[in-house]
Amino acid sequence: MKTTALTNVHIALGAKMVPFAGYNMPVQYTGINDEHATVRNGVGVFDVSHMGEFILKGENALELIQRVTSNDASKLFDGKVQYSCLPNENGGIVDDLLVYRIDDKTYMLVVNASNIEKDWNWISERNTNNVEMHNISDKTSLLAVQGPKAAAALQKLTDFDLASMEYYSFKKGKFAGVDNVVVSATGYTGAGGFEIYFENEHAEQIWKAIFEAGAEFGIKPIGLGARDTLRLEMGFALYGNDIDDTTSPLEAGLGWITKFTKEFTNSTALKAEKEAGLKSKLVGFEMIDRGIPRHDYEIFDAAGTKIGRVTSGTQAPSLQKAIGMGYVTLDNSKEGTELFIGIRDNKVKAKVVKYPFK
């Protein structure tokens, strides 16, 4: 198993460690519910250094990104971030990712940990115009400092005016006494906050500085367990659960990052799919009767006909109810539609609701 630069810190803090995407990662410290509440109401820190980072440089960097991603990266400007995906040639998704424009010839792509090698190979195979590519994943650490008190906690560590940074923007400079740090107003929790990229050698220094700065705000380390419940309450898709090599970005609700104003991998087929009308859709649902939905449970309509499957589900800590996401046939995707989740030998009642869950 791989480790991050902070693995020994997590172990010393008493974190429960689990294998995740080939890494030894902290899943929880004090408990998922406590950590979840810390991020929703205050500020918490996730070590997400297992994520992958690629630098693409050169005259043709944007052209390559435009060909392999579904969103329109030509809309980016220096210091702007964009959510996008890498479509495959069979109607599915290689990965979802973030695209950072550092300057007009330099971009950083941030990809999922489990897909680093797959994504690198996918993009490399399509690099026909000599774009300079660097996989900096193994030497880059990433901390997600998330929650409504994140800006106040971190402001002591930088001259950037964090409170005024727009969502999906970033700045690069000095942070916690370290040069060349990227501070990005992004995250996967829906609670606000920042993601901070830096070289591994500075990991313990920056971790310590963040916890000293955040002490008055009750800052805590947060594991991957709460990361999952936080993202699910917002209806954010997780690669490998809600989206994968077989799921259509359009059916996954990612039409907003699928721009047919340009040509990209499989764009002709995806445009035809949109024009023909979708057959199924990824929806959010909340349980009406008692039961917790889990990945791959079957979904039925009132007549007992199977209409889909659950992709994610949990007991939502902030909401005190069970929620989930899953693909259902289009005629069962409207808000308020009654669904039944196959839990053990029972069909348990649920209903379709909008994101974020409330």
Image (cartoon, rainbow, N blue to C red):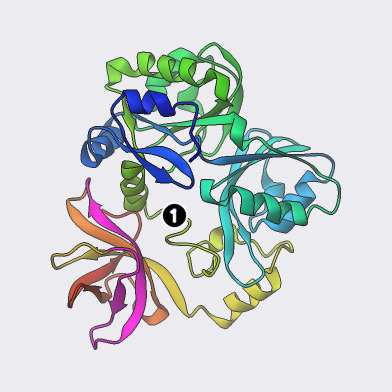
Q: Is residue 228 above or below residue 241?
A: above
Q: Which residue is mark 1?
A: 238
Q: Residue at x 63, y 55 (%)?
A: 71
**Residues drawn in magenta:** 294-317
Q: Residue furthest front?
A: 1
Name the residue nearer the viewer: 280 or 221.
221
Q: Position of residue 109 (x, y in %)?
A: 64, 43
Q: Position of residue 82 (x, y in %)?
A: 59, 45
**Image side of residue 204 versus residue 306, left or right:** right
Q: Quadrant of residue 19?
A: top left
Q: Is residue 326 above or below residue 42?
A: below
Q: Position of residue 59 (x, y in %)?
A: 85, 41
Q: Would residue 195 be visible to someone looking at this image?
A: no
Does residue 117 show up magenta in the picture? no
Q: Is residue 129 above or below residue 277?
A: above
Q: Is residue 311 above or below residue 75?
A: below
Task: Identify which amino acid the numbered label 1 is placed on.
Answer: Leu
Name the residue nearer the viewer: 214 or 13.
13
Name the residue nearer the viewer: 221 or 169.
221
Q: Position of residue 165 (x, y in %)?
A: 51, 29
Name the residue nearer the viewer: 168 or 39.
39
Q: Residue at x 24, y 63 (%)?
A: 286
> Which type of secondary structure does the marked residue at label 1 adopt?
loop
Does residue 312 show up magenta in the picture? yes
Q: Residue furthest left?
A: 290
How many numbered marks, from 0 up?
Answer: 1
Q: Residue at x 22, y 46 (%)?
A: 317
Mark 1 crowd level (few <14, some 14–19, many ≥20, 10 Å Cα): some
Q: Would residue 50 be visible to someone looking at this image?
A: yes
